[in-house]
Amino acid sequence: MRPNRREFLTAAAQATALAVTAGAATAIEPIPRNGTPKFKFSLAAYSYRSLLAGKEPTATLTDFINDCAKFGCEGTELTSYYFPKAVTHDYLRSLRRQCFRLGLDVSGTAVGNDFGHPPGEERSKQIALVKQWIDFSEILGAPVIRIFAGHEKPGTTPAQAHSLMVSGIEECCEYAGQHGVHLALENHGGPTATAEGLLQFVRDVNSPWFGVNLDSGNFHSDDPYKELAQIAPYALNAQIKVVMSGPDKKKIPADYKRLAKILRDSHYRGYIVLEYEEAGDVREECAKHLGDVRAAFA
């Protein structure tokens, strides 16, 4: 018999409590590296949201990919939000062909999911969405998908919500591994708003296909750089924003050299993805900041 909602949440809370008790003092090993950092550079399609979204978009993903090549990137991050509503395999293959001919990797993609829902239709939809994009990523040749944990829902405790999110991630990771795709959890508010919260997922999710999507602009503590250093050893992908902020949310320019040192010290090997969210001519600003980021990470 399938457990009802209350039974599931009770069992989830008990399982989480046992896991926390057993593993609270146990740290996991960082992602194995060879000791030598290596950086490649990409641009997130989210940077072009003002051009790619809305009732009358002024650019397409094809245009975005062309610009990534023009800017000298090694990769392009194709955010799922800007794909056609009805994605076909032929369309995905056409983008992969375009990238290959321009000398670009599809460095990754990103979905907007929420695993905080209890068992039911909405939770099934969220899991199906991520699995669908695992299929799409395999066709694109994208090795990693940025995912979210989700948010606690009314009627659930933080422990129950955590267990729901962990089980959702693990189910999707199992499917992802069958397709050679990694899932990278972003530090993106809610239970992942702090390094401590994010690392709880790193400790509890049991899958070799799981890791962190380090977003440099999403910690807002007194020392966000310290928190970024805590999660960097587990990063599968690194998104760099041009500004950062503390508890007051006042924006200040990001210290690219300090971010580079954090990732270098963790022996990170992978893509540095500019995710531009500020004002101005997006093409001009992305070109400028990609140059600045590349210089800082050299």
Image: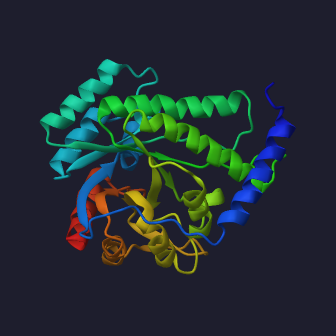
Q: Is residue 120 left or right of residue 86?
A: right
Q: Which x, y percent locates residue 96?
A: 24, 31
Place residue 268 in its image quadrant.
Answer: bottom left
Question: Which is more toward the observer, 53 or 107?
Answer: 107
| Image point (55%, 50%), residue name | 206
Residue 186's x, y, as percent? 50, 55
Q: How many marks?
A: 0
Residue 219 location (% of width, % of height):
54, 68
Q: Residue at x 60, y 56 (%)?
A: 204
Q: Is residue 249 left or right of residue 40?
A: right
- Nearest the camera: 106 or 252? 106
Q: Residue furthest front?
A: 22
**Residue 278 visible at all:** no
Colour setup of the view: rainbow
Quarter of the figure with residue 22: bottom right
**Looking at the image, which residue is at 33% across and 76% down?**
265
Q: Is residue 291 above or below residue 259?
A: above
Q: Quadrant of the C terminus?
A: bottom left
Which residue is at the far bottom? 222
Q: Is residue 52 above or below residue 248?
A: above
Could you say which quadrant of the image residue 269 lies in?
bottom left
Q: Residue at x 20, y 52 (%)?
A: 73
In this orientation, does residue 182 appear? yes
- In the rendered image, which quarter contains the N terminus? top right
- Is 209 above or below relative to 33? above
Position of 25 compared to 272: left or right? right
Image location (x, y in percent) of residue 134:
43, 33
